[in-house]
Structure formats: structure tokens, C-alpha cells
């Protein structure tokens, strides 16, 4: 990651005014997902290109209590490494990161308790071999003011960095030290809760203030060596998505922000909520020094689209899948029976059915590990494996996979169709970034 940042800065200095006709900027996509098909697709795409694969877990997905995946940091590492071996990714090309590492998972508790748990979590991430650490203490806890003062955010980031550095020093096979991402203008994980029309881009003054406060706090804590490994800031480039629309990146609105980072040696920006940006916009983000492009819900949304299409193929081909026992009926039935993962987000009863299935925030991603949903997915893939559909149906419902089959790049096997569908979300990112 340090080398990637250096190479990005060197390439950027050769193109003082980035142009859409330039070669892709040096950068890297960050896949923030725990779904095995999404991860397998990512690892296979990167292996085929000889590119590094940056896989990140969030504090809500993976923590010492198991998160919503049931995995601790060491569990997640072993899980991803096992997939990487299957998909042929060289071990040295796998980079593990921790996203939104801070008190977010325990923010309903008093700050003292939430931060103590966050320190344990960060230490476990680093001890487990995660080397890209996003220190995010921007959220208020139960007894905090709202919003949390930025000086306090920086002070809490320092606490977590101290825990991370100690864990690295004490690790038996400590390897290279961790690199850090800071920043307080963090988009809502998983997309906005409300309808959006436009977003304010972080001002250079705000970015500078964040950087100065963190630099001073790190220095006061004796963390100069760790500060040298701060590689990126999370800011708001003006991109986001709500339930049914996307706020596209506009380079002209971020020009001053991009110019600011050019004056900060060794730093790039990390862009969150880049899901659903067009290939052109992703390339523009990378060229404007958003060298780390995060994607998560967009990948599981593509997975869901592919599964819905396979269910339609099954219905046309085998006359199944359209009732409550089919995949779609099972997924939506489980979501309605267990609404805790979507109820705070989907507020309009009139469009609830559409939101449950098609919202860009993709709350379905929390339900793929449910036993009933897993069984329905396995049954769908098994039936199509034993009775492969004709290409005419794939042309109708999965046209991109149909083209790949005709071109000899893909086989008409349901598991491969599904993985290719998930990979569609990553390919624009790989195209936008040069390794």
C-alpha cells in the first residue's frame, strides 16, 4: 500500500491536469464484503490480472463478538485465505483491511465502554494480519455530544492507533507494520438513509483541519513512526447513493479538494460509497487522487441481480421458482419475518416491496447467510446444474453472460454464471485503476 501511494503520487506529478485520455491512474479497488461468491469473484479477477486484491471487513461485519457474519478477525483472515488459494491468487497479492474500525458497533453504549471494546477489536485485527486500518471514531456514543468535536475524534483515533501499534509489536509473526487511513467526513456505511439530490464536497479547509488535528494528536502521543504510515484520508468527493438513485462524481466540484492533496506528500484520498458510479466516473475519481475506491453494496446488488435472473430462468425453463418456496419468495419472506436489518432504512410502506428487493442500499446482503436463504440458493443452483437452460433464456435474462459463453470465456454452469455476475461490479474498478 505504501508503494501504491508512492507510485500514484509519482504518476500524478507527471499529469498535473488529469485528462480523460490519460492512462488509468495508479490506484486500487477495495472490496468490502463478506459474501463468499463476491470474494471469490474478486480474488479470481485479481489473480487473472496479477493484481493485488484488497479485501476489507467492517467493524459491524467482523469483530471480537463475531459481528453480523459470526466471524472474528482471525476467522475472516482464514476464510479469505482459503478462497484465495482456491482462486489462485498469490499470497503476496492479498491485502486485508479493516474498515470503520472504531466504536460504531457499540455506539449505543457510553463512550468509555465503546472505546474499550474498539481498542480490543483493532488489536485483534492487527494481530490477525490485517495491515490497512481505517481509524474511524467519528460517531457519537451514548453519552457524547452530537456531533462529536473533531479534536475528540482525533484523540480517540490516537487511542486506537496505540492499540494497533502495540498489537503489531507483540505479534509472533508481526511482519510489516500496519498503514492507516484517517478522516471524519465518512459517508453512511451502506448508503444514505434518505433521498438525496446533491452533496457538498469536503472543502480543502476542512480537510486541512482534519489532517492538522490528527498530525498534532499523533505527535503528542509519540506516534511519529505511525504517522509516517498514514496513507490516506476519507473525505466526501460528492458521491453517494440512496435507495433508488446515485449522486455521480463531478470532477469540477472536487477540483480544489484534489489540488489540496497534491500539497500533502505521501497521502491520497480514500473514496467511500463509490458503488454504482459509472466507469468514466471511477476513472475520474482515481485520476483526482481518490486512489482507494471502496465498493460493497454494489457488489452484493450485482449478485442479487444475477440470482433474480437465474430464478427467472428457472421459472421459464423448469416451471418453478415463482411461488413462496422459490428463491425470491424465500428471501423476501425471511426479510419480512426478521426485519431488524432493514426496518430503520425503509420507511415508506407504499414502496416497501420494491425497497426490500431493489434498493441500492441492498439490505438483502445481511440475509444471504440465513439458513433458509442459503438452502433456497443451493436448490436453485442445483436444479439448473442438473438441467442446464438453453442459451436463448440466458440471452433474455443474463445477456452479458450469454455473450461471454458465446465468446468461449464462460461455461453455462449456474455457479459460474453467478460468480461472473458478481464480478461485473468489480471490473470497472480494475479498469479505472492501474496496479
Image: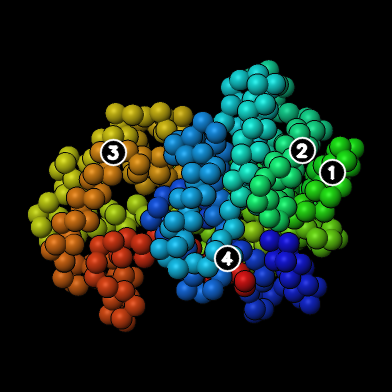
Q: Give me the residue at 28% from left, 38% from top.
A: 371
Location of residue 24 by image quarter: bottom right
Q: Name above or below for residue 335 compared with residue 91.
A: above
Query: Which residue in the rendered view is the most extreme toward the front?
Result: 172
Q: Which residue is mark 1?
A: 223
- Is residue 151 visible in this depiction of the protein? yes
The residue positioned farthest toward the bottom in the image shown: 407
Of labels 2 and 4, earlier in sequence is 4
What residue is shown with label 2?
Answer: 162
Where's residue 171, x and y in %?
67, 45
Q: Secondary structure at mark 3?
A: helix
Helix, strand or loop at label 1? It is loop
**Callouts 1 and 2 close, C-beta under 8 Å:** yes
Q: Which residue is mark 4?
A: 93
Say the numbered circle drawn on residue 245: none
Q: Element type at marker 2?
A: helix
Amino acid at each position: 500500500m505504501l508503494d501504491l501511494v508512492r507510485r500514484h503520487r509519482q504518476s500524478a506529478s507527471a499529469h498535473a491536469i488529469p485528462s480523460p485520455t490519460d492512462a488509468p491512474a495508479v490506484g486500487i479497488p477495495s472490496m468490502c464484503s463478506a459474501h463468499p461468491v463476491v470474494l471469490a469473484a474478486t480474488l479470481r479477477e485479481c489473480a487473472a490480472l496479477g493484481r493485488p486484491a484488497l479485501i476489507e471487513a467492517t467493524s459491524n461485519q467482523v469483530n471480537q463478538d463475531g459481528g453480523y457474519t459470526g466471524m472474528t478477525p482471525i476467522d475472516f483472515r482464514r476464510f479469505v485465505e482459503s478462497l484465495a488459494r482456491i482462486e489462485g491468487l498469490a499470497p503476496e497479492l492479498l491485502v486485508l483491511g479493516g474498515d470503520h474500525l472504531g466504536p460504531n458497533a457499540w455506539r449505543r453504549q457510553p463512550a468509555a465502554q465503546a472505546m474499550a471494546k474498539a481498542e480490543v477489536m483493532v488489536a485483534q485485527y492487527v494481530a490477525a494480519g490485517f495491515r490497512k486500518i481505517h481509524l474511524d471514531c467519528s460517531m457519537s456514543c451514548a453519552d457524547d455530544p452530537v456531533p462529536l468535536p473533531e479534536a475528540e475524534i482525533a484523540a480517540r483515533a490516537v487511542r486506537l492507533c496505540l492499540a494497533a501499534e502495540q498489537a503489531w509489536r507483540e505479534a509472533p509473526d508481526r511482519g510489516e507494520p500496519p498503514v492507516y487511513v484517517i478522516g471524519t467526513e465518512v459517508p453512511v456505511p451502506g448508503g444514505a438513509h434518505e433521498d438525496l439530490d446533491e452533496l457538498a464536497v469536503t472543502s480543502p479547509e476542512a480537510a486541512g483541519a482534519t489532517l492538522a488535528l490528527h498530525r498534532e494528536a499523533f505527535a503528542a502521543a509519540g506516534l511519529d513512526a505511525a504517522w509516517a504510515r498514514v496513507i490516506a484520508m476519507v473525505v466526501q468527493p460528492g458521491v453517494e447513493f440512496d435507495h433508488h438513485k446515485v449522486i455521480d462524481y463531478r470532477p469540477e466540484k472536487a477540483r480544489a479538494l484534489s489540488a489540496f492533496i497534491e500539497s500533502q506528500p505521501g497521502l491520497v484520498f480514500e473514496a467511500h460509497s463509490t458503488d454504482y458510479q459509472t466507469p468514466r466516473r471511477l476513472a475520474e475519481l482515481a485520476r483526482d487522487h481518490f486512489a482507494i475506491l471502496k465498493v460493497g453494496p454494489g457488489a452484493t446488488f450485482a449478485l442479487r441481480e444475477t440470482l433474480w435472473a437465474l430464478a427467472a430462468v428457472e421459472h421459464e425453463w423448469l416451471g418453478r421458482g415463482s411461488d413462496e418456496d422459490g428463491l425470491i419468495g424465500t428471501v423476501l419472506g425471511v426479510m419480512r419475518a426478521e426485519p431488524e436489518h432493514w426496518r430503520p432504512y425503509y420507511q415508506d410502506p407504499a414502496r416497501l416491496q420494491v425497497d426490500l428487493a431493489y434498493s441500492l442500499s441492498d439490505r438483502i446482503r445481511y440475509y444471504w447467510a440465513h439458513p433458509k436463504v442459503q438452502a433456497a440458493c443451493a436448490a436453485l443452483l442445483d436444479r439448473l446444474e442438473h438441467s442446464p437452460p438453453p442459451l436463448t433464456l440466458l440471452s433474455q435474462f443474463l445477456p452479458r453472460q450469454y455473450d461471454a459463453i458465446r465468446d468461449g470465456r464462460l461455461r453455462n454452469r449456474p455457479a459460474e454464471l453467478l460468480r461472473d455476475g458478481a464480478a461485473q461490479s468489480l471490473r470497472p474498478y480494475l479498469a479505472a485503476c492501474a496496479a
